[in-house]
Amino acid sequence: MGVDVCVSERALREIYLRGFEIAVKKGKPIAMMSSYNLINGVHAANSRELCTIIAREEWGFEGVIMSDWNTTVPENGSVPWQCVAAGNDIIMPGNQKDAANIREAYEQGKLSEEIIRCSAGRILKMIQRLSN
């Protein structure tokens, strides 16, 4: 939880993300987990670049992204509403402070209804897929 990985864009994509890219494109997983650590100063769970732009837009991942366990618990951990804005659909295990933070961000206009609905839709799609 205390690591900040400082890595170039090229090394990140060609070395560290390559295995995940292969798994997403070939395995078509239903879900994946973001991590605790910081990457170039940004919590992975709060990184729109990783969760949405790379995983969803570039690799075509259509499943659910969930945070690693208790990523929002430490004071210097991930910010709950930023997890959702980044593309996480589920914050594990989820607690009242997370819910309050997300509601407050929505009320303040930091988090749009569209992002919340997209996240909920992905969760419902996963439930439906696993129920068949």
Image (tube, rainbow, N blue to C red):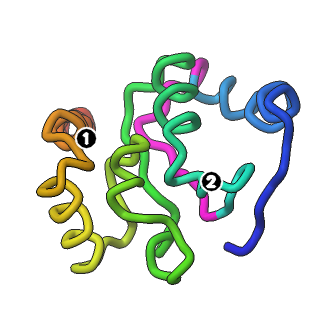
Q: Which residues are magenta?
A: 25-36
Cα–Cα gap, marks 2 and 1 = 21 Å
Q: Amino acid at mark 1?
A: Ser
Pointers 2 and 1 in contact (C-beta within 8 Å): no
Q: Nearer the viewer, mark 2 or mark 1?
A: 2
Tell me the quarter of the picture where residue 121 sits: top left
Mark 2 secondary-structure assignment: strand
Most foreground residue, 76 or 89: 76
Task: Please tell me which residue is depicted at 55% across the width and 51% down the height of the picture.
Answer: 34
Q: In this rendering, would 8 be left or right of 118?
A: right
Query: In the displayed structure, would residue 99 be above or below residue 106?
Result: below
Q: Residue at x 24, y 37 (%)?
A: 115
Which numbered disc covers residue 94? none
The x and y percentages for residue 102 are 23, 61
Label 2: how many residues lie within 10 Å, few (<14), some (14-19) or many (20+)? some
Quadrant, the N terminus: bottom right
Looking at the rendered image, the quarter that the C terminus falls into is top left
Quick check: 34 above or below 113?
below
Tell me: 9 left or right of 50: right
Question: Is residue 35 inside the magenta stretch?
Answer: yes
Where residue 70 sits in the image (x, y, percent)? 47, 75
Residue at label 2?
42
Residue tagged 1: 119
- Find residue 47 and report its horizontal and vertical position in percent: 54, 45
Is 30 left, or right, of 42 in this rendering? Answer: left
Q: Residue at x 52, y 54 (%)?
A: 45
* Identity, as a three-letter code, of the amino acid under mark 2: Val
**What secondary structure is marked by label 1?**
helix
Q: Is residue 119 above or below residue 26?
A: below
Q: Earlier in the sequence, mark 2 or mark 1?
A: 2
